[in-house]
Each structure stands twice: as C-alpha cells, then as structure tokens.
Amino acid sequence: MSVVREPRSIARIFLARPQQEGLGAVVRRSIGRFELRYFDPFLVLDEFSVSAPAGFPDHPHRGFETVTYMLQGAVTHEDFDGHKGTIEAGDLQWMTAGRGVVHSEMPAAEGTQKGLQLWINLSSQNKMVQPRYQEISSNNIAEATRDGVKVRVIAGEALGVKSTIHTKTPTMYLDFTLKPGSQIQQPIPKSYNAFIYILEGEGIFGQDSTTNSPISSHNLLLLSGFGDGLVAWNKGSKILRFILVGGEPLGEPIAQLGPFVMNTQEEIDQTIEDFENYTNGFEKARHWRSEARVELGY
C-alpha cells in the first residue's frame, strides 16, 4: 500500500443541503453554491435525486466538462447531435461540452434515480474544443480491493490500477468503500486541489485518527493544499463510502452565466449570442427537441 508521509488536513467542511434544480429534481449542491462558488478547477458538485416525470430537460453547456456517476437507478441522456444512451447504477459518463452541447438528462427507471454530477472547468485553450463523450459501464470501471478497502478508479490511479479516462484538465476521481476497522493511504499530486464527499457512513480524515472526530454522509471536505496524500479511517460499525477528487488548478479568470463558463464577460456575451442565433457550435439546436421533451409536451 502506498505510504503518505505528509497527510493533508481538512481545511473546511460543508454540509450539502437539499435544494430544487432542473424540473422537479432535488440536488445536494456542495461546490457551486453561495459559500463555495468555485474550487479550482471544479465548478459544481451535485448529489442528485430524481423521479419521473422530474428531471433535467433540454439545456445547453459550454466551456467545461460534466462527469455523471450513477449510484442508483438509471438516467437517459440525449443531445442535439444524435448521441443517446442510458447510464445505470455504477456507470459513468464523462462529457466534454467544449464549444457547445444541448442535451437532456431524464429518469430511465422506476423509483428514484441517484447519482453525482461534477463540473470540471476547461482551460482557455480547451474551452472551444469539439464535444466528446467517454462512457464506461460499471463492469469496465477499474477496481482494486485490499485489506478491507475497495476503490473504483473513475480517473487517475489507486491501489495499483489506472483508469482509462482521458482528462483534459488533469483530474483524479476515486470511489472508496472502507469496511469497519480499515484505513486507506492515498497519494495526491502535491499541485492538486482535492476534496472528499461522503456518500455513506462516517469516517475520520486527516492527520490523526485519535483526535479528529468522525464526519458523516452528505458532507464535503476541502483538503488543505499542503501534503502528499489522504489518510482515512473507518472506526465505525458500518461501511464508509466516499469519493476523493483532485485536480490541477487552472489559475485562470472565470466568467459564468449558468451553464456557460468562459474566461471573460465578452466571451459570455458571445456565447449567449451564439446560443440564441444557433451559431458557432449551436447550429443543431435550432430544430432539435429531445424525445423526453416531446413526450412531456412542452
């Protein structure tokens, strides 16, 4: 197992509270809310919960990537370029919106669909790249198990296994499950900003398992910028599940208007003009309506 010599401490903790988003969906937003607008290079982290007919109907994006990781149920995605597919529990979709995508994300199963969506900023040189999808089914996501710890490697490397995902902005995204009594040491590149989001159970994170208090689910933990990795313990009686995400800060100015993220206000103004006039990447939006929107009759 990797040795972490300088564990990062917890800099800040946020409890992600439920709020309405999209068409009747409920999200727990941690990054991208008033108290934490941005954590370079990350723009938004939502833990979403949605049941039909609610969802996220036709909407645009430009200038960043969306990473959708399903935890329960299924969601169907379709876009104005004819790309369509359904991701189920454990599946991943890594979408590079680049110069422009208009798409919908709607429930595809009975009951409640749950998952995570992370928005990762793109550098100025990558904001207008052609859109791209990387989709991985659950059984093709790299996994490793050791000493009571299981990790699913969405991006980056852990416990000797690597993800096949290519990241425009250097990123690690790891899904850890720790059995009671187990612990993990996970290296983090020193230049990365990194955070933890707890999905289930409670754990101890940081430098000292004897003085730190356990932290429970739906909490976002921003890690300090100093240190070479994460140390975490599960001292409870139930499993602990959390994601560890890190990325190379871009250090660039941000101009954002909802689903458009650029570097300057002038670029935002141009994006609005492009979207409203169906130009410069949004041409196919003029006559497109998702099947879900047609079925809902609006």
Image: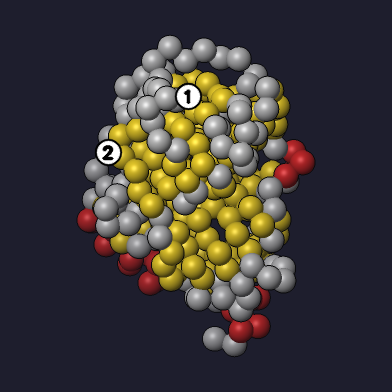
Give coordinates of residue 160: x percent, y percent.
65, 19
Q: Which residue is drawn at 54% across and 32% down?
A: 235
SS at circle 2: loop
Taking 126 as reference, is 88 left or right? right
Q: Sort mark 2 into few (<14), some (14-19) or many (20+) by Cα contacts within 10 Å.
A: some
Give coordinates of residue 279: x percent, y percent.
42, 64
Q: Residue at x 65, y 83 (%)?
A: 295
Name the mark nearer the viewer: 1 or 2. Answer: 1
Identity, as a three-letter code, of the amino acid under mark 2 = Glu
Taking 178 as reference, is 278 left or right? left
SS at circle 1: strand
Most foreground residue, 216 or 79? 216
Most foreground residue, 90 or 87? 90
Image vertical order of residue 73 relative to residue 9, above or below: below
Image vertical order of residue 2 relative to residue 136, above or below: above
Q: In which quarter of the image is the N terminus?
A: top right
Q: What residue would you read off at disc 2?
A: 252
Most foreground residue, 83 or 238? 238
Q: Can residue 219 be seen in this view?
A: yes
Taking 279 as reference, is 82 left or right? right
Say the numbered circle drawn on residue 231.
Answer: 1
Image vertical order of residue 8 relative to residue 58, above or below: above
Which quadrant of the view contains residue 196? top left
Q: Quadrant of the C terminus?
A: bottom right
Q: Residue at x 71, y 56 (%)?
A: 88
Identity, as a three-letter code, of the amino acid under mark 1 = Val
Say the numbered circle drawn on residue 240.
Answer: none
Q: Sort mark 1 into few (<14), some (14-19) or many (20+) by Cα contacts within 10 Å.
A: many
The answer to whether marks 1 and 2 mark residues whose Cβ atoms lie closer than 8 Å is no
Q: Is residue 124 visible?
A: no
For marks 1 and 2, the one nearer the N-term is 1
The residue lying furthest to the bottom in this view is 297
